[in-house]
Amino acid sequence: MRVLVVEDDPRIARFLELELTHEGFDVKTVHDGYDALLAVEEFQPDVALVDIMIPGIDGVEFTRRIRERRDDMGIIMVTALGEKKDKLEGFESGADDYVVKPFDIEELVARINAVARRSKQRSHETIEVGGIRIDPASRKVMVDSEEVELSKTEFELLHYLARNADVVLSKERILDAVWGSDFYGGTNVVEVYVNYLRKKLGPQSWRLKTVRGVGYVLRSDEA
C-alpha cells in the first residue's frame, strides 16, 4: 500500500517514514501543499497523512482540491490542532479521519488500513444519474441500458460531473479536477469535451446543461 506523508516537521516526517516503511508500506514524504498535489499525481497514494499547518497551501485546502478530483484516495489529518472547530473543518474539507498529535503509531497504522478499505469500496460504487449509469470499477457507462463507449478523458469528465450531480461547476474547477493543475491549456478544452459527451449521451444529453457565464451541471431531474 502506498502512503503519502505531508508533514513540514522533518523529525515527525522521518519518524513516520521509518515506522510505516517498517510496517510494510511504500512511503513518500513531502513537506508542503504544492509538492503534495504533484506527489498525488506521480505517486498515486492509497492514503495520505496530512498535517494542516504546512507551507504553500495548507492541509485543509489540499484536501479540498484532492476531493474535487477523486474520492478513491484516503485522507487522514495528522495534526496538533485538536479543537472541535479544527476537526469539523478537516472533515468538511473531505478528510476520512482525524488524528491529533501526539499519536500512537500502532493506532495510526490501524486507521490507515481502515481508511484504505473504505476508500477502495467507495471508488467502486456505481453512480446513477437518471438514465445514466457509471461503473467506475469496469469503467463502463450505460445510457438507457445501452453501453456507450467513452474515451478516458470523456469518462473522467462524466464521472466527475456525476459525482457532483446538480452542482454547478465552473470550467476552471472542471479543468483542474479532470485535466489536473499542471495542465497548461485553456478552458476551451472543457467545452470541446462537453460537446463530445452530449453527442454520446444521446437521449440523456439534456441533463448536461450549460450555465451561461459559469460552467456546467449534470442534472438528476428536469429542474
Image (tube, rainbow, N blue to C red):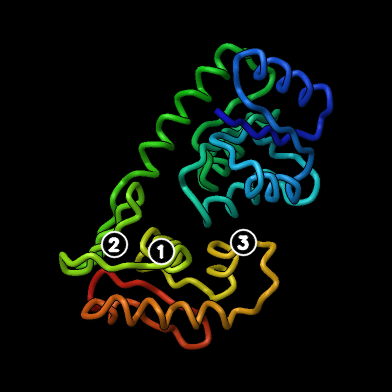
Q: Provide the residue designation for mark 1.
A: 155
Q: Quadrant of the image for the C terminus?
A: bottom left
Lower position in the chain sequence, tag 3 or tag 2:
2
Residue type at mark 2 is Val
Image position of 115 with respect to 178: above or below = above
Position of residue 220 relative to residue 37, above or below, is below
Q: Where 27 sits versus 19, above or below? A: below
Q: Nearer the viewer, residue 77 or 46?
A: 46
Distance from the alpha carbon under mark 1 to that under mark 2? 8 Å
Per the rendering, the mark at residue 141 is 2
Q: Which numbered dot is residue 23?
A: none
Which numbered dot is residue 180?
A: 3
Identity of the amino acid at label 1?
Phe
Q: Quadrant of the N terminus?
A: top right
Q: Residue at x 65, y 51 (%)?
A: 61
Q: Nearer the viewer, residue 86 or 5?
A: 5
- The extreme left residue here reads 145
- Asked whether disc 3 touches disc 2, contact meaning CB atoms under 8 Å apart, the reply is no
Q: Nearer the viewer, residue 121 or 62?
A: 121
Q: State yes or no: discs 1 and 3 in contact (Cβ < 8 Å).
A: no
Give the residue type that dot 3 points to: Gly
Q: Position of residue 90 (x, y in %)?
A: 57, 41
Q: Position of residue 92 (x, y in %)?
A: 51, 46
Residue 78 rendering spot, x and y as whole percentages: 64, 29
Category of crowding for the residue at label 1, using alpha-carbon neighbours closer than 10 angstroms: few (below 14), some (14–19), many (at least 20): some
Residue 105 horizontal side relative to residue 137, left or right: right
